[in-house]
């Protein structure tokens, strides 16, 4: 057919169920299975066909069906209950924030991707799930919070396996009228738009609202007729295309994102950049202050003082960096808009890289983000450590532990990933308000009183559902690939509900080592095909479209799954998305993760499995290094670092098989009792991981460690026309200029041997080059093994500083002396990044 136009005919909802439409536009339903049930029951076939999308379902369901359910008193009763719960959630007054965060100022959160639900495919993996879950908990806690992101109209991609098990990508154009979004309106009632200059063009961006419980997400959409065909594609695909496209997308997210907040009058005092993708928000925020009369440096201070940066990438190559020439093409006009030189701006992002056999300066999104924030964090304790080492070079003279990057360990949104059956069971022992106190560790101890049978009933039910889901998915894939009737029929026998079932699903980045399990196939065969104690595996995951090694992993798993001894016992599912994730984490017995340590910044899927009583079995990396307590799951390998990756793989595979053979399998099949019993491990997984790795705990950590301090400091630095920012900026410029002329020498009056408790005199002579003595922190640094102590030297006269430094314990001490410029009002003493050692 030749389409000459399109029109959406809205459903006419009968009075008795009138608010189904309103609810469809609030993703509250995405963590409320009872709400989803109202839509799926309208027509389960439509519901499934359109990715369980309530808006689409209402558009597709015939009017007679709506009339029918409206006349069904049982349906209407459930509808009434869901709406009452929804209203109670939305209108609750004594929320966590009203009690605990009264001095919190409005937060604006920027992320390239968000995973809220599979029907809104604007995410690729863990980063998106994290951002989506963060919003959901911000809503649960009632924070003043707005999120900004991109409306990718072709999403990431839909993954299909061909008959050889090779990944193929399909891009579906989304029909916006079927999504749970509404136009973001300005005062005159029209849809808001902003304009961004990218290179030589003005790109028009249309704004949409997405409602996540109590909070609002603003989505940017460049797919409008005013734009050229190429510009319309700027918001087509997530992580598609080349570096050129990437930079332009980052300009859009950062600059159009800030303009969107302004045109919609959304208050924002604290800015949170989720990964370096969002860093270019700094351009627009600096420009605003410069336009208001501030100089460039003071504007930078003002902007950074209210900004938090979360880094997620533990490998240098994973951090986006672009040539200066590429940046010139797309942001070449910006220095002038900020009354700054090119080097002033690019200097804030500079990372010299060894490219094509020589050193070239690059514009690093991460370096820019670090410089455009006054607080930064990694996403687990170990990742914090790794990040401090990785960015240590930006703070010459500092030790890694001094690098001002902290950590908040990730969490997951419990209700999004916990099955309704498990929620119902938990509700029998937890207090009535348990869904509002998810981070409360004491509360979760009540899980001890759940019986073995209660838990195994729920888990068996969920496992059956998962197996049915796997069979349907495999059947569809077989039919599409033209498989034989016998092969299609065989999908009915895939997996057994009586076998110990292990799940493995994630992005197929090579460091995740999806094929580690196959390192010793004979040993694996013996584990899987033990007739008394069978074991089976379900895999899923997407490789980035350009990642052929990742795709080869998928194909290898597919091929192994077709080998006679593994058929029906190893399965790889296509199109890993939130729907597949929910089925797996709710239905498997154990969750497996074996990344190459320390490359998994956090990982979150194992948390989701633990919430459902599927204990985690993983390398001690990311969150599991903190979560594993000896009773709630199993480790793989140890905390050793290997230089030889092959050796590491061998050791980890050996550990994986041994744990399965000696502990996990016997435990699952009831050969161990008491504290070693399976049910005990399940209870421990639920009660230890649910609170500590709840997204609620994570967001509370962000509020306390970062959002509130930044609210206070950001306001102070910006007060009185940025008086404090001007002072800090002026001082920094002066100190930077003088620093090369400063000198420090030091001496210590040391005996050859000393007694514990003895003190030694340390003296430093400084040429301050005009810097005020009080603005130089001169200190002795004592290190004894791993241990470091710092002792301040006090100013005497004539530019000398001294201290009596105690040598507390026995041992070999090394003593150094250094100076660091410092004034009151800085966020941390290394803000300037200047340290000089004697
Ligand atoms: C939770 C989740 C992830 C992230 O899991 P990791 O443990 O970080 O690998 C990725 N994709 C989907 C669909 C998820 O639900």
Image (cartoon, rainbow, N blue to C red):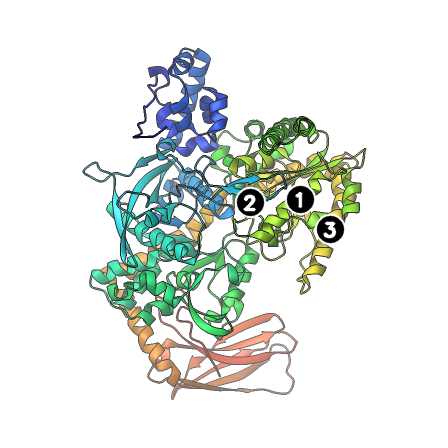
Q: Residue 623: x and y, percent?
A: 58, 50
Q: Tell me where residue 628 appears, x and y as whole percent.
A: 64, 48
Disc 2 secondary structure class: loop
The residue at 53%/76% (across/down) is 781
Q: In the image, what residue occupies the spot 37% across and 67% down?
A: 325
Residue at the extreme front = 2
Horizontal placement of 630 versus 722: left or right?
right
Give the total number of marks visible in the rendering: 3
Q: Quadrant of the N terminus?
A: top left
- Residue 542, labelled with which disc? 2
Q: In this view of the protein, which residue sits in the foreground, 32 or 355?
A: 355
Dot 2 surroundings within 10 Å: few (below 14), some, or many (20 or more)? many
Q: Nearer the viewer, residue 762 or 611?
A: 611
The dot on residue 519 is: 3
Circles 2 and 1: CB distance less than 8 Å?
no
588 in relation to 625, above or below: above
Disc nearer the start of the sequence (2/1)? 2
Ligand 1 shows up in the quarter that is top right
Element carrying mark 1: helix
Local packing at callout 3 (Cα closer than 10 Å; few below 14, some 14-19, many 20+) is: some
| Residue at x-position 45% and y-position 26% | 35
Whether 560 is drawn above or below 60: the answer is below
Q: Residue at 43% of width from left, 37% of height from top?
A: 120
> Is residue 779 shown above or below 208?
below
Q: Which residue is mark 1?
A: 557
Q: Secondary structure at mark 3?
A: loop
Real-space CA distance between mark 1 and mark 3, rounded to the nearest whole angstrom: 12 Å
Q: Quadrant of residue 807?
A: bottom right
Q: Is residue 831 left or right of residue 430?
A: left
Image side of residue 806 versus residue 311, left or right: right
Q: CA distance from mark 2 to mark 3?
A: 21 Å
């Amino acid at each position: 057919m030749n389409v000459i136009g399109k029109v959406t005919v809205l459903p006419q909802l009968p009075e008795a169920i009138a608010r189904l439409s309103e609810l469809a536009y609030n993703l509250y339903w995405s963590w409320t299975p009872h709400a989803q049930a109202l839509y799926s029951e309208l027509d389960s076939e439509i519901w499934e066909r359109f990715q369980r999308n309530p808006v689409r379902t209402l558009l597709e369901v015939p009017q007679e069906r709506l009339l029918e359910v409206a006349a069904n008193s049982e349906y209407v009763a459930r509808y009434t209950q869901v709406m009452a719960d929804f209203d109670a959630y939305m209108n609750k007054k004594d929320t966590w924030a009203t009690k605990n965060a009264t001095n919190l100022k409005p937060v604006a959160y920027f992320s390239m991707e968000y995973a809220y639900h599979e029907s809104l495919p604007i995410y690729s993996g863990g980063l998106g799930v994290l951002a989506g879950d963060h919003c959901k908990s911000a809503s649960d806690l009632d924070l003043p919070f707005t999120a900004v992101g991109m409306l990718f109209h072709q999403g990431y991609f839909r993954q299909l396996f061909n008959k050889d098990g090779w990944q193929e990508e399909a891009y579906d154009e989304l029909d916006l009228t079927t999504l749970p979004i509404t136009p973001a309106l300005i005062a005159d009632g029209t849809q808001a738009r902003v304009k961004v200059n990218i290179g030589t063009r003005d790109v028009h961006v249309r704004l949409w609202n997405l409602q996540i419980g109590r909070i609002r997400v603003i989505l940017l959409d460049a797919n409008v007729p005013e734009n050229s065909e190429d510009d319309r594609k700027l918001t087509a695909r997530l992580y598609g295309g080349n570096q050129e496209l990437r930079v332009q997308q980052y300009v859009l997210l950062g600059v159009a994102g800030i303009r969107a907040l302004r045109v919609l009058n959304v208050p924002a005092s604290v800015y949170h950049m989720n990964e370096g993708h969002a860093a270019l928000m700094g351009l627009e925020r600096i420009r605003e202050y410069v336009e208001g009369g501030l100089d460039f440096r003071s504007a930078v201070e003002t902007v950074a003082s209210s900004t938090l940066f979360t880094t997620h990438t533990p490998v240098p190559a994973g951090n986006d960096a672009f040539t200066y020439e590429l940046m010139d093409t797309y942001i070449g006009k910006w220095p002038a808009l900020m009354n700054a030189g090119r080097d002033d701006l690019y200097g804030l992002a500079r990372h010299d890289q060894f490219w094509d056999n020589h050193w070239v300066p690059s514009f690093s999104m991460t370096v820019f983000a670090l410089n455009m924030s006054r607080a930064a964090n990694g996403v687990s304790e170990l990742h914090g450590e790794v990040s401090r080492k990785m960015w240590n070079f930006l703070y010459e003279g500092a030790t890694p532990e001094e690098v001002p990057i902290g950590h908040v360990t990730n969490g997951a949104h419990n209700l999004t990933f916990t099955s309704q059956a498990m929620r119902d069971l938990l509700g029998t022992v937890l207090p009535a308000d348990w869904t509002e106190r998810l981070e409360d560790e004491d509360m979760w101890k009540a899980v001890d009183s759940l019986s073995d049978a209660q838990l195994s009933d729920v888990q068996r039910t969920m496992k059956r559902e998962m197996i049915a889901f796997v069979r349907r998915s495999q059947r569809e894939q077989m039919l599409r690939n033209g498989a034989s009737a016998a092969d299609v029929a065989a999908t009915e026998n895939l997996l057994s509900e009586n076998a110990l079932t292990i799940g493995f699903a994630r992005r197929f980045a090579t460091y995740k080592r999806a094929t580690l399990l196959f390192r010793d196939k004979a040993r694996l065969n013996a584990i899987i095909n033990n007739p008394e104690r069978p074991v089976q595996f379900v895999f899923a995951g997407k490789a980035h479209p350009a990642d052929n090694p990742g795709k080869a992993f998928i194909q290898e798993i597919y091929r192994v799954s077709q080998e006679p001894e593994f058929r029906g016992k190893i399965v790889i599912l296509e199109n890993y998305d939130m729907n597949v994730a929910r089925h797996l984490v709710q239905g498997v017995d154990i969750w497996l993760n074996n990344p190459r340590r320390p490359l998994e910044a956090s990982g979150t899927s194992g948390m989701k499995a633990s919430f459902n009583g599927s204990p985690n079995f993983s390398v001690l990396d990311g969150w599991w290094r903190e979560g594993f307590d000896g009773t709630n799951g199993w480790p793989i390998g140890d905390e050793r670092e290997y230089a030889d990756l092959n050796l590491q793989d061998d050791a980890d595979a050996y550990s994986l098989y041994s744990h399965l053979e000696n502990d996990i399998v016997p435990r699952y099949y009831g050969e161990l009792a008491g504290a070693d019993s399976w049910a005990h491990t399940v209870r421990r997984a639920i009660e230890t991981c649910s609170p500590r790795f709840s997204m609620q705990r994570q967001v509370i950590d962000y509020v306390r460690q970062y959002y509130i301090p930044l609210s206070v400091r950001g306001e102070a630095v910006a007060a009185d026309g940025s008086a404090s920012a001007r002072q800090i900026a002026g001082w920094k410029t002066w100190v930077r200029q003088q620093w090369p002329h400063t000198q420090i020498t030091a001496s210590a009056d040391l005996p050859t041997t000393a007694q514990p408790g003895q003190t030694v005199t340390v003296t430093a002579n400084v040429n301050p080059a005009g810097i005020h003595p009080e603005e130089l922190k001169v200190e002795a640094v004592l290190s004894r093994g791993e241990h470091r102590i710092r002792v301040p030297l006090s100013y005497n006269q004539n530019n000398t500083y001294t201290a009596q430094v105690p040598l507390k314990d026995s041992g070999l001490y090394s003593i150094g002396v250094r100076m660091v410029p410092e004034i009151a009002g800085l966020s941390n003493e290394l803000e300037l990044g200047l340290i000089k050692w004697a």
